[in-house]
């Protein structure tokens, strides 16, 4: 499979969101990555449904929703209704992860599970066959523009081995500090989807940066 690029709108210009959405629409990006933070699970608050509704109206590509919220079960139906294609929940935020993943799929969305940097891959052994994607956090979640954690590379290798051994259909997504230097290494060890915020939106030509990430 050719890898996918999911620009994170967290680093977009919120005063000119429409312009940045149109840029992503016209680019070779595959998805929009939307970071939802509640100020509880992570020490930051991003945006919620009123903003996501507007994004969904303009976006011409699937919405990849990354929930950094406690007890995400409360809101998955509303995220699906607001246009989510993928709904990814944190392993660390779910007491009944299997139930949550099945509920996301029952709604007709794709289900992703996210691992924080401190959470080991082997904890996925009993859920890996039931998910559509695993998101490896390569920074501690909460903010854009942080430094990539190198240990994410062996984690992706371990995850790829687990997916192969279990014949799981899960994609591997990587999120946090992804740039043009580490992207080839991430793809080499098995990443399927690269999220990038700062690397894209703080570059002089964001569409060209997306193209460079896509053409690796
Ligand atoms: C961090 C978010 C990321 C973030 C990535 O908590 O999950 O999606 O926007 O931003 P960069 O690519 O700047 O690290
Ligand atoms: Zn994210």
Image: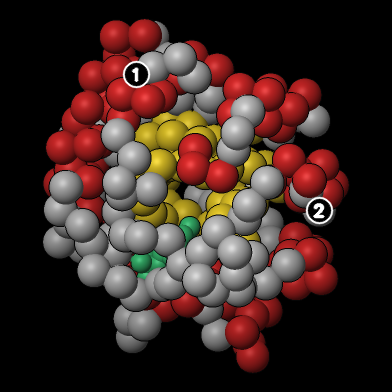
Q: Is residue 200 visible?
A: no
Considering every residue shown, the one lying at the far bottom of the view is 15
Which residue in the rendered view is the most extreme toward the top?
166
Q: Is 48 or 180 nearer to us in this picture?
A: 48
Q: Earlier in the sequence, mark 2 or mark 1?
A: 2
Q: Is residue 14 left or right of residue 29?
A: right
Q: Quadrant of the N terminus?
A: top left
Q: Residue at x 31, y 24 (%)?
A: 122
Q: Give whichever of 196, 154 is nearer the camera.
A: 154
* Mark 2 lies on residue: 82
Residue at 36% x, 82% y: name it.
202
**Residue 177 drawn at (x, y percent):** 29, 64
Rendered view: 48 above or below 79: below
Residues at discs 2 and 1 in contact (Cβ within 8 Å): no
* Image quadrant where residue 187 sits: top left
Q: Is residue 56 visible?
A: yes
Task: Mark 1: give few (<14), some (14-19) or many (20+) Cα within 10 Å.
Answer: many
Q: Which residue is mark 1?
A: 163
């Amino acid at each position: 499979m050719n890898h996918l690029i999911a620009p994170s709108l967290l680093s977009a210009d919120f005063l000119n969101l429409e312009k940045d959405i149109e840029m992503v629409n016209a680019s070779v990006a595959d998805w929009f990555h939307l970071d939802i933070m509640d100020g509880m699970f992570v020490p930051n608050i991003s945006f919620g449904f009123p903003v996501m509704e507007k994004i969904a109206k303009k976006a011409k590509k699937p919405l990849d929703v990354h929930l950094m919220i406690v007890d995400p079960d409360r809101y998955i139906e509303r995220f699906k209704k607001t246009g989510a294609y993928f709904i990814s929940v944190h392993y660390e935020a779910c007491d009944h992860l299997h139930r949550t993943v099945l509920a996301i799929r029952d709604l007709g969305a794709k289900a992703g599970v996210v691992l924080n940097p401190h959470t080991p891959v082997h904890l996925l052994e009993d859920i890996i066959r039931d998910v559509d994607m695993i998101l490896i956090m390569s920074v501690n979640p909460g903010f854009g523009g942080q430094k990539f954690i190198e240990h994410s590379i062996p984690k992706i290798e371990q995850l790829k081995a687990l997916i192969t051994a279990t014949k799981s259909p899960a994609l591997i997504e990587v999120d946090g500090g992804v740039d043009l230097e580490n992207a080839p290494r991430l793809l080499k060890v098995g990443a399927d989807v690269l999220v990038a915020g700062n690397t894209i939106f703080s570059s002089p030509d964001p569409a060209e940066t997306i193209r460079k990430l896509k053409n690796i």
